[in-house]
């Protein structure tokens, strides 16, 4: 039996999502920005699992599985981009990558 | 205080503190290790929701596979402490924190509007979290197409990662 109110889980995941947003907007290291995106994806996963369990509907957990697959694909491609960036510019700081900036 | 609430509070504090450590530590390896701790506490929270399969997958995929990749890249690039932002960039941090706070206020407002789910689902939760019901739902006619599509996403990602890290594309 689930005895806790669902608001506890929703509030916690909102807090983690905000922490992830602050990280994405304020850090300059591309890998840490990447880890903050994982934080945000995970907080949404927590919301989906909580709703799925409280409403007795499996759709939420299937969606979490799909989100995890996309996160794994994103990890592979994102880190490959960081590697290619480091090889070409010798930096992983996003504010030093400004070739497209006019 | 009930046992459920005690476990929830311990795991929630662990999750929030390790998330803060991820964005506050200057050393990327420390951030990565805090993120592993964060994933472990989220797996614990899934267990308090009776979603056993999700907890196992969380540990295997995130803490097992994704974090190994991240730590591997950090060590391969030999990244040290992050230097302070240039002065012209410090406004960016203030704007970033401000924008996040606005988003936070919106989310908290949304929480007060949420419809309280019916309590009838709670007796179903024990069954729904088990691997059998996840598998039955995943391979039912409703979700088998997205399931197959996601395997294409994985294939594209694998090919893309190889192509991106090739030194010369000939």
Image (tube, coloured by chain):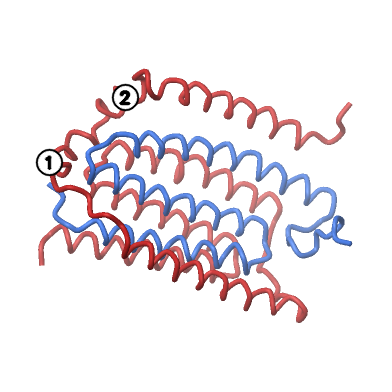
Chain colours: A blue, B red
| Neighbours of disc 1 within 10 Å: few (<14), some (14-19), many (20+) | some
> Residue B137 is drawn in which quadrant?
top left
Q: Earlier in the sequence, mark 1 or mark 2?
A: 1
Task: For the residues labelled 1 and 2, say whether their Cβ atoms are less than 8 Å apart.
Answer: no
| Neighbours of disc 2 within 10 Å: few (<14), some (14-19), many (20+) | few
Q: Dot 1: what SS? A: helix
Which chain contains the residue that carries disc 2? B
- The CA distance from mark 1 to mark 2 is 20 Å
Q: Quadrant of the C terminus of chain A?
A: bottom right
Q: Which residue is found at the position 57% from the left and 74% from the top?
A: B97
Residue at which label 1 appears: B123
Pick the residue in front: B142 or A29: B142
Q: Which residue is found at the position 36% from the left and 46% from the top?
A: A48
**Where's residue B151, x and y in %?**
53, 24
Pick the residue in front: B91 or A91: B91
Which chain contains the residue that carries disc 1? B
**Where's residue A82, x and y in %?**
71, 49
Q: Which residue is found at the position 73% from the left and 57% from the top?
A: A92
**Where's residue B81, x and y in %?**
65, 68
**Where's residue B76, x and y in %?**
68, 49
Residue at which label 2 appears: B135
Q: Dot 2: what SS? A: helix
């Amino acid at each position: 039996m689930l005895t806790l109110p669902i608001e506890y889980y929703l509030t916690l995941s909102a807090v983690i999502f905000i922490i992830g947003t602050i990280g994405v907007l304020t850090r300059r290291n591309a890998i840490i920005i990447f880890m903050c995106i994982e934080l945000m994806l995970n907080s949404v996963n927590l919301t989906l699992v909580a709703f799925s369990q409280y409403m007795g509907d499996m759709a939420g957990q299937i969606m979490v599985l799909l989100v995890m697959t996309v996160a794994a694909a994103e990890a592979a491609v994102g880190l490959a981009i960081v590697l290619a960036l480091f090889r070409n510019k010798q930096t992983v700081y996003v504010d030093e990558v400004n070739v497209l900036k006019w | 205080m009930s046992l459920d609430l005690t476990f929830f509070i311990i795991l929630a504090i662990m999750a929030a503190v390790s998330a803060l450590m991820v964005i506050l530590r200057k050393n990327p390896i420390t951030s990565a290790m805090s993120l592993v701790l964060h994933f472990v506490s989220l797996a614990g929270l899934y267990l308090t929701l009776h979603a056993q399969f999700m907890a196992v997958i969380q540990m295997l995929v995130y803490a097992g596979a994704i974090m190994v990749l991240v730590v591997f890249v950090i060590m391969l690039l030999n990244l040290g402490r992050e230097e302070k932002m240039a002065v012209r960039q410090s406004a960016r941090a203030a704007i970033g924190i401000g924008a996040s706070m606005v988003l936070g206020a919106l989310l908290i407002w949304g929480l007060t509007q949420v419809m309280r789910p019916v309590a009838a689902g709670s007796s179903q939760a024990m069954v729904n979290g088990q691997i059998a019901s996840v598998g039955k739902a995943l391979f039912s006619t409703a979700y088998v197409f997205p399931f197959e599509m996601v395997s294409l996403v994985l294939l594209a990602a694998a090919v893309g990662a190889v192509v991106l890290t090739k030194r010369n594309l000939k």
